[in-house]
Image (cartoon, grey):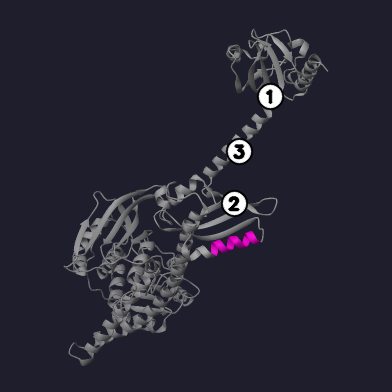
Amino acid sequence: MDERMQGQDAIARLAAIVEGSEDAIIGYGLDGITTDWNQAATRLYGYSAEEAIGKSISVIVPSSRASELTEILNTVSTGGRIRQLDTLRQRKDGSLVEVSFSVFPITAQNGAVIGGASIVRDITSRKQVEEELRRGEERFRLLAQATKDALSDRDMRNGAMWRSDNFWEQFGYSRKEVEPDVAAWRELIHPEDRDRVLNGFQTSLARHADSHEVEYRFRRADDSYAVVWERTYIVYDECGKPIRALSAMTDLSDRRELEEQFRQAQKMEAMGRLAGGIAHDFNNLLMVIGSYAEMMREQLSAEDGLHKSIAQVQRAADRAASLTQQLLAFSRKQVISPRIIDLNTVIEDGLKITKRLIGEDIALSILLGKDLWAIKADSGQIGQVLMNLCINARDAMQSNDELTISTDNVSLNLEEAQKRPGLIPGNYVALVVRDTGTGMTDEVQAHLFDPFFTTKEAGKGTGLGLSIVYGVVKQNRGYISVDSQLGRGSTFTIYFPAVDAPLTMTITPETRKYEGRGQIILLVEDEDALRESMSAYLDQHGYKVLAASNGAQALHFAKGHAGSIQALVTDIILPKMSGPELARKVTEISPTVVTLYMSGYTDRELMDYDPETSAAKFLQKPFALRTLLETIGEMIAQQK
């Protein structure tokens, strides 16, 4: 076979390759006139070879890309090449197609450039895949931003790890502080949890489990620990080897804190009910002891030897009564008299007592906010709160330490309120008591408001002081928080809701000695000994007493003396019928009757009585019989 035949065969083979190519192959002269056009070009652009050859290749170039054609011809004419260009081309039907092509020159035997050739590929499908990938990545990025979870992707083969932006934001790390690998993640697990977490994950891998869930403590950048819940999806290859682990880590710290606060609140409520019940029964017993002691003292002369002994009995009963008042304050079962008050005034009024409490060796600083908003609270209780906080601070301090009492107006938005679980956004007046004493451990803080919990040695305290503070703050619709560390002192912050109302004016009542003149008193008390002592005392001081042990008996007396009963004295908690319910029925029979409530403690859910708006009065047991006498006398006098 001669060289000519071989050349023709080579050309034939080349032509077959060109025609069989999946890519469009187009030849053209330096003037842009098409000289070659394969079948793939026809499939891509819609022009047949007969339609395309002899015409300018500009027919497939959109007008918006005309400059590209000029650049291609210029490049080819100088012997240059274009390796890859992604662009748009126009089909015969006018539609556009995304293509990628390369360009190279065609030379004659003498080396002169006589034209160019383009190899063109339809990249529509590739672009669609790329767009789907871009959208998927964008969707994943948005989802990662939308969730509060910290996401991660671990390569199980080399230990590399990707973390979402939430990881760095939630736990406070910069990307330079934590190495992007599994080893760094292990070091951030709490040492006490590490073996459990790692062994549990290995167990899931050994079982070829698709997922794994675990709760553990994870170290933040400030060295505190977050409680996290991590859910992991495990990917295996075709041989069953784990290759990826995709995890979502939820920070449960706030939720756990709320759960702990809820458990604490439930515990405090249960203990409060117990304390309130004990105080109720104990107060009745103290009333019996104190009442008979008081009556005996009135009947004895001051020179009588028994007079002094009975006085000791009364003093002991008074001290016991003080203890029950503390129990009532903790259990929030006191009847309070809230007023519109200025917190600064309460603090200033108690300043002398405060200074005596802490002693001269402790530096006291008072920083009272200007133009303080008013609050609605019982000023006596607020004074008690301040006293107990100062005592607690004093016991934690040494000479030359400092105690600071400050007040200020505070407006909390939603974000700020959420940092203090249980506090709602709004305007508050803050009372802050800060000391530079020994501070407290986390364990002590966890039991700080428990009744009878104390770190003092035996005989140095009852352990009721801070529980009273807690009860009073809650009863006055406030909120209390504690910030303390060992060696850095403690700060107690109390938030009282601010009110927009004028301050309540207080009037000191005139002290008078009242005696009865035969007026009829309806006395209702289910404790027999107490009923008998009060009845006998009132009878001795000029009143006619109708003594009933329950509501039904009291109503029977009321109907038998309709219109003539001047005062109803009743316990609030009675069997089968409450004191307020009895008072309403007695008032229907005798409209002018005045009502005096009394109780050892008051369950507010059962009590239909508001001391601020009701015309009725209230005495908290135990009280002196002289107080009962004077109160009844004042009420009857005001009635006239």
| Label 3 residue SS | helix
Q: Which percent across, then down, holds residue 566?
A: 36, 71
Q: Identify the residue under disc 3.
A: 136
Q: Which marked residue is nearer to the observer: mark 3 or mark 2?
A: 2
| Label 2 residue SS | loop
Residue nearest the viewer, comparing 410 with 614: 410
Identify the amino acid type marked 1. Arg
Q: Is residue 53 left or right of residue 455?
A: right
Indicate whether 245 appears above or below 622.
Answer: above
Q: Identify the residue under disc 2.
A: 157
Q: CA distance from mark 1 to mark 3?
A: 25 Å
Residue at position x 57%, y 37% from top? 138
Q: Which numbered disc covers residue 121?
A: 1
Residue at position x 68%, y 30% from top? 125
Count residues near mark 2 (Cα–Cα under 10 Å), then give few for <14, some for 14-19, many for 20+: few
Indicate whether 344 appears above or below 520.
Answer: above
Q: Which percent across, then down, holds residue 253?
A: 47, 57
Q: CA distance from mark 3 to mark 2?
A: 25 Å
Q: Which numbered disc covers residue 35?
A: none
What is the quadrant of residue 59 in the picture? top right
Identify the amino acid type marked 3. Gly
Q: CA distance from mark 2 to mark 1?
A: 37 Å
Q: Which residues are magenta?
A: 196-206
